[in-house]
Amino acid sequence: MKKKIQNSKFKIQIILLVTCYLLLVTDNAHAMHISEGILPFNWAALWFLAATPFLAYGLYKLRKMAAVDLSFKPLLGLMAAVVFIISCMPIPVPTAGTCSHPCGTGMSAILLGPAISILIAAVALLIQALFLAHGGLSTWGANIVSMGIMGSFAGYLTFKVFRLLTPLFPPFSKGGLGGLAVSGFMAGLLADWATYIMTSVELASGIKGDSAFMPLFWKILIAFMPTQLPLGILEGAMTAGMVVLLYKKRPDLLVKMRVIKAAEAKI
């Protein structure tokens, strides 16, 4: 038992050291998300306005759920830490004026719902902009829309759709575990890719000037592909792993968060 605890502590220490290394060696000239000053004021303001109602509804849901369930806040804190750490691993894409990185919003949306996931992403993005020079304050609204809103809803809706579809196929019709893994993988994959499609829209609309929107959009999107295609697959695997692990170790938590039904938790 002591050896297992020591091994777990060692793994956590390694993860923290790697994370700190990635944060320290990252070049601020390629700050992750959409960097400070990239978007003109009118576009930055527009994305702030678009994000505001989602943040307000997220706060409403947070107060409502925390009042009903006292154990909700610790889970919220855990997921906020996960999203923060995962999205702190940038890979510079100089031709796009920003970075590629995993997002983590697929995981948080599956467990806590898209409204809370958006709120978590907003807090993570704000801390990164203030203390790590990742992203920016003027582009905070745009980054919330791409990573928080698009990532969360894409992950949540994809998971729900695949949960309905996988029982129709024989390999996933029994046991539930295969269907959960596939649904989690697709949720993480599409949450990641949806984030970068929206980021491409925001960048192209903000910096196009008198140029045509679509050619610039495709240029930016293609610039993301070499890093984001494999990162999306990685995030899909991470999300599937999280769902499967909880199903094996804490199915009651998945039932509580309405990810699965009580009957499915009987392994």
Image (tube, rainbow, N blue to C red):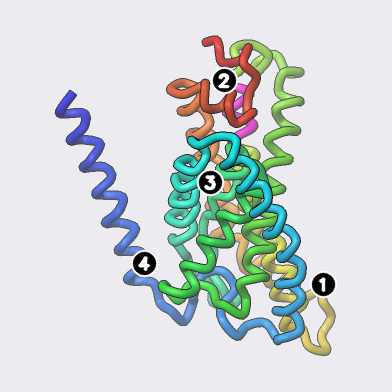
Q: Tell me the element at label 2.
A: helix
Using the numbered discs, state the Cα–Cα distance from disc 2 to disc 4 in whole angstroms: 35 Å
| Nearer to us: label 4 or label 1 | 4
Single out the residue that lies furthest toward the front.
Answer: 67
Q: Residue at x 71, y 31 (%)?
A: 162
Single out the residue that lies furthest toward the bottom.
Answer: 210
- Quadrant hosting residue 266: top right
Mark 4 / mark 3, whichever is N-terminal: 4
Contact (Cβ within 8 Å) of mark 2 with mark 1: no
Given the image, on which type of amino acid does mark 4 rest?
Leu
**Residue 267: % across, % down:** 52, 10
Q: Residue at x 65, y 19 (%)?
A: 261
Residue 214: image tag: 1
Residue occupied by mark 4? 23
Q: Residue at x 58, y 61 (%)?
A: 122
Using the numbered discs, state the Cα–Cα distance from disc 4 to disc 1 in whole angstroms: 34 Å
* Residue stretch in magenta: 177-184
**Residue 160: % across, % down:** 72, 33
| Nearer to us: label 4 or label 3 | 4
Q: Tell me the element at label 3.
A: helix
- Quadrant hosting residue 233: top right
Vertical order, 73 against 259 (above or below): below
Mark yes or no: residue 95 visible: no
Q: Tell me the element at label 1.
A: helix
Residue 177: image tag: 2
Please give left or right for residue 5 compared with residue 89 in the image.
Answer: left
Given the image, on which type of amino acid does mark 3 rest?
Glu
Using the numbered discs, state the Cα–Cα distance from disc 2 to disc 1 in whole angstroms: 41 Å
Mark 2 / mark 1, whichever is N-terminal: 2
